[in-house]
Every structure is written in structure tokens, then in C-alpha cells.
Amino acid sequence: MIRKMGDTIKTTKGAIAMGAADFCTCTDKACPFHPARHGQGCTPCIAKNLREGEIPSCFFHAIDHPKPTDGWHYEDFAALVQAAKAAGKL
Ligand code: SF4
């Protein structure tokens, strides 16, 4: 079965619409790529991050440690992982 945007899928947390990305923890709802602003789920965000050499904010938010740098690039994520590891949080 091929699903399309807007189809409802069942998850352990209930039914969600394809493309809704209800799990998104990005707080920048003014961003045109945020799932709340269109019906394409993570696709626009991932495309933008790949284009700019960045990591989506949900990955940063998944680590319980303050960001040690201001950016969202690969090296900023690596710095966060290292800082969290040094603090014993990973
Ligand atoms: S990839 Fe982007 S849109 Fe998808 S959950 Fe992460 S931050 Fe949100």
C-alpha cells in the first residue's frame, strides 16, 4: 500500500495524518519549512538542512544539554554531542 500526504496512519500514540510531523520539537514556527506551515511533514526542513549543511533542530533538542555554540551546522551538533558526553549525559 502506498500512502500519501493527508492519509491517516495509526501509531502507538494514536492516529496521525501523514505529513503532520506531530513529533517535531522545532520552536521556530515562523520558519517556512516548519511542518505547521504546510502539509509536507519533514521534507522541506530536511531539504533545507541538507542544502545548508545543517542538522534539524529536533536532533539538538533530543539531547538534554545546553547548546555550546550558536549555529545549527554539523560541527555545532558535534560540539553538543561532545559537551553532553563530557557532562555524562550521553
Ligand atoms: S526534521 Fe525538521 S520538521 Fe522534521 S521533526 Fe525535525 S525539526 Fe521538525
Image: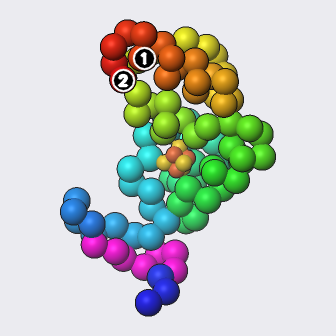
Q: Secondary structure at mark 2?
A: loop
Question: What separation in Å lies between label 2 and label 1 (alpha carbons)?
Answer: 6 Å
In the rendered image, is residue 28 in sight?
Answer: yes
Judged from the image, the secondary structure of the residue bearing numbered disc 1 is helix
Segment tinted magenta in the rendering: 4-10
Point out the image quarter for the C terminus. top left
Q: Residue furthest bottom?
A: 1
Residue bearing the label numbered 2: 90
Give the quadrant of residue 18. Answer: bottom left
Mark drawn on residue 84: 1
Tell whether label 1 touches label 2 (CB within 8 Å): yes
- Residue 67 shows in the view: no
Tell me the crowding category of disc 2: few under 14, some 14 to 19, or many 20 or more residues within 10 angstroms, Cα based.
few
Classify residue 29 by image quadrant: top right
Nearer to me, 87 or 70: 87
Is residue 20 or residue 74 the one in the foreground?
74
Circle number at residue 68: none
Q: Position of residue 80 (x, y in %)?
A: 52, 20
How crowded pointer 1 is (Cα within 10 Å; few <14, some 14-19, many 20+) is rated as some
Image height check: is 78 above or below 30? Answer: above
Give percent across and percent down for residue 30.
60, 40
Find out whether residue 6 is within the magenta segment: yes
- Circle 1: residue type: Ala
What residue is drawn where x is 53% and y is 60%? 41
The disc labelled 2 sits on which kind of residue?
A: Leu
Chain-order first, disc 2 or disc 1? 1
